[in-house]
Image (tube, rainbow, N blue to C red):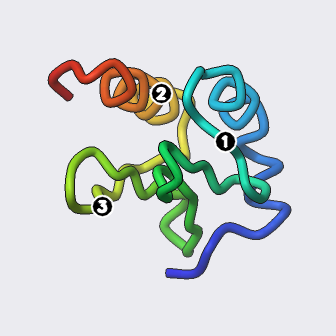
Amino acid sequence: MKHATGPALDEIASLLDKLRELPGLIEKSRGIFYRRGAAFVHFHEDPAGIFADLRSGPDWERLPATSAKQRKELLRRVRAVLTDRTV
């Protein structure tokens, strides 16, 4: 699965805007966010859609981010990790 290209990131632009607003996240390059100096969330694309890799612990977790519902859930999960709540 390849990293998301510009057109794929354009599809999730509103999600990226919401991630940019969250305290503690730094976007080092478009669609690649860091937390505390370590990669935290980034995006991939393949024929099945757009996916996010989220570091919610020591490992990466892959979450779908194609539909509005999936993006809403991803944002909820990101917020939960940032506030150290159970995801």
| Residue appearing at x 70%, y 37% in the figure | 16
Q: Which residue is mark 3?
A: 60
Q: Amino acid at mark 1?
A: Ile
Please report contact status of discs 1 and 2: CB closer than 8 Å, yes or no: no
Residue 79 sits in quarter: top left
| Residue appearing at x 42%, y 50% in the figure | 64
Residue 67 image offset from top left, x and y in percent: 54, 38
| Marks 1/3: CA–CA distance | 18 Å
Pick whichever, 71 or 83, lies toward us: 83
Numbered disc in front, either 3 or 2: 3
Residue 44 sits in quarter: bottom right
Identify the mark nearer the N-term, 1 or 2: 1
Q: Which residue is mark 1?
A: 26
State the SS at label 2: helix
Q: Amino acid at mark 3?
A: Trp
Q: Amino acid at mark 2?
A: Leu
Please report contact status of discs 1 and 3: CB closer than 8 Å, yes or no: no
> Where 61 falls versus 87 (above or below)?
below
Label 1: few (<14), some or many (≥20) within 10 Å? some
Please report contact status of discs 3 and 2: CB closer than 8 Å, yes or no: no
Mark drawn on residue 42: none
| Residue appearing at x 58%, y 81% in the figure | 2
Residue 73 image offset from top left, x and y in percent: 39, 27
Mark drawn on residue 75: 2
Pick whichever, 83 or 41, lies toward us: 83
State the SS at label 1: strand
